[in-house]
Amino acid sequence: MVLYLHLHQPWRLARFRYLDLGSGRPYIDEVRNLEIFRGIAQRSYRPTLTRLGHLLDEFPDFRFSLSVTGTYLEQAARAAPDVLDTLRRIVRTGRVALLSETYYHSLAFLLPPPELHDEVELHRAALQREFGVHPTVLRMTELAYSDELARFAESERFHGMLVEGWEGILRGRPPTYVYCAAPAPTVMLLARHYMLSDDVGFRFSSRQWNEYPLRAEKYVSWIAATPGDVVNLFMDFETFGEHHPASTGILDFLSALPRTVRSVPALSWATVDEAAELPPHDTLSAPTTVSWADQNRDLGAWLGNDLQRSAFEAAKKVGVLARSSGDPEILETWRRLLTSDHFYYMYVGGHGADAGVHQYFSSYGSPYDAYANYMNALMDLRRRALERISVEPGPGTMGRDRTR
């Protein structure tokens, strides 16, 4: 069994109107972001990390894996440094594996080089600085995966990647084996068992679910009855205490898992690094990008409508200017705007299950509000980058105006 949890918080935008262009107003509402972080820390991060720490102390065979975005680390350091201290302590046990990803939980994997490499390097440096680790397994934003990304992982010397265990990529094969990437055979692929993962991540507290209430004994019996070499349970960390409040029994469920698993001789725990050492069962190929987002498992969560595509194309163009400006602050700001959440809030998809999830995470009144606010901030950043580019320092001068 591989339990993997994802820790991420974006830097949400402040209200930025068209009239605010050129005003110098910040794009990020830092006070609000840190307030949100503190609230989630109280409901989810602290109680769940505390329980996981106790489980590591009580059960020497228990282990799990985490991915922690750079934007999460930034907010934790400012809003709840004790959460960061707890993370460091559990990583020091040697039984908690950390994964690499893009620092900003961004759509950098859709941009020309070297942006993806640069963001992964930024994230690697942050993990080395904060935890003293050098991960060997890579995950892209929302488990995005393609043959091209497998080649990237191989070029960056990663031993494994996470993928969504979806029928569209597995083509009739079970997600309970390790696979290798068809274009990059040295990269082992761990496929998420989305049915068992979503039983906890989405259905745990649903009283309409025919398996409600879900107890650890029942859940572990399902895992034990699942054929294969490895069952990959991949979820958002906020599943525990935020998406499902403590009052639902979700934290008690988590606490009961290691003891229940211990009672089944055929089951044991593994980190992503350890699971990636298993021999591959077969090869997997993904000519187009798949993800764990929404029911279609594609890029539609961020680029499925004209609003999203328009915003992303504009962001790509501003990125060229941000790099050309030579200004680290402008480049960092652009990368914060490349965070996938901003495009997620622009989703327009009717009234189905996907729409409900998007609305749950968004604080905007509508996707159109999210788009307008984002574009105003992006255009202001474009203005700043152009102003910076227009002045090129020269020897013995204060700079010259390139526009003349």
Image: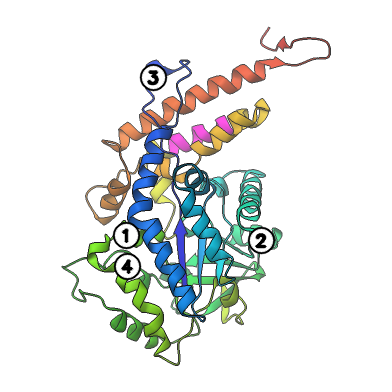
Q: Residues within 10 Å of mark 4 (few under 14, many from 20)?
A: many
Range of the magenta residues?
A: 309-319
Q: Residues within 10 Å of mark 2 (few under 14, many from 20)?
A: some
- Which residue is disc 4 drawn over? 251
Disc number lying in front (4 or 2): 4
- Between 134 and 180, the residue placed more toward the observer is 134
Q: In the structure shown, which secondary structural element does the residue marked by tag 1 occupy? A: loop
- Between 222 and 166, the residue placed more toward the observer is 222
* Callout 3 touching callout 4 (CB < 8 Å): no
Q: In this view of the protein, can residue 377 be seen by the observer?
A: yes
Q: In this view of the protein, can residue 296 be seen by the observer?
A: no
- 19 relative to 152 in the view: left or right: left
Q: Say the numbered circle drawn on residue 18.
A: 3
Q: Earlier in the sequence, mark 1 or mark 2?
A: 2
Q: Amino acid at mark 3?
A: Tyr
Q: Residues within 10 Å of mark 1 (few under 14, many from 20)?
A: many
- Residue lying furthest top: 404
Q: Say the numbered circle drawn on residue 134.
A: 2
Q: Earlier in the sequence, mark 3 or mark 1?
A: 3
Q: Earlier in the sequence, mark 3 or mark 4?
A: 3
Q: Amino acid at mark 1?
A: Gly
* Callout 1 touching callout 4 (CB < 8 Å): yes
- Which residue is disc 1 drawn over? 241
Q: Earlier in the sequence, mark 3 or mark 2?
A: 3
46 shown above or below 211: above
